[in-house]
Amino acid sequence: MHPKAPLVPVAIVEPGKTLAYGGRQDKYTGNIWIFVLNHEGESTRLISRWLAEYKSNLINKIVYNWLVEPIGAIMQRKMLMTIKKLVELNALS
């Protein structure tokens, strides 16, 4: 998070398993970001989901569907790939 960004409340913490944070910003706007560690045998998968709620009007639908969600998906993929790379490098050390 950016140091000047508003604080985001933590909704769920299950150590070693789940982290969810987010909440309602106002009457119409809210979001939540969830990270889950799924242990599968000798490997672990990190799953990330982001959900945004906004006032339903044409401008917001265009902004969220055509800008925010695609850009967020690209940024989230980069973040997850970087985490994977760092974890794999750490495992080799």
Image (cartoon, grey):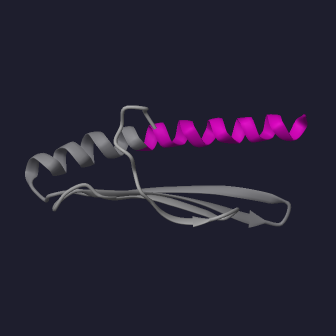
Secondary structure character of the magenta stretch overall: helix
> Which one is nearer the viewer's eye here, 41 or 16?
16
Q: Which residues are magenta?
A: 73-93
Q: Position of residue 19 (x, y in %)?
A: 56, 60
Q: Tell me the quadrant of the picture where the C terminus can be found.
A: top right
Total numbered circles: 0
Q: Is residue 48 above or below residue 77?
A: below
Image-based side of 52 in relation to 26, left or right: right
- Seen at 75% across and 58% down, the residue is 44
Q: Is residue 26 inside the magenta stretch?
A: no
Q: Position of residue 72 (x, y in %)?
A: 40, 42
> Which one is nearer the viewer's eye here, 37 or 77?
37
Image-based side of 93 in relation to 27, left or right: right
Q: Is residue 25 visible?
A: yes
Q: Is residue 52 above or below residue 41?
A: above
Q: Is residue 52 visible?
A: no
- Seen at 27% across and 39% down, the residue is 67
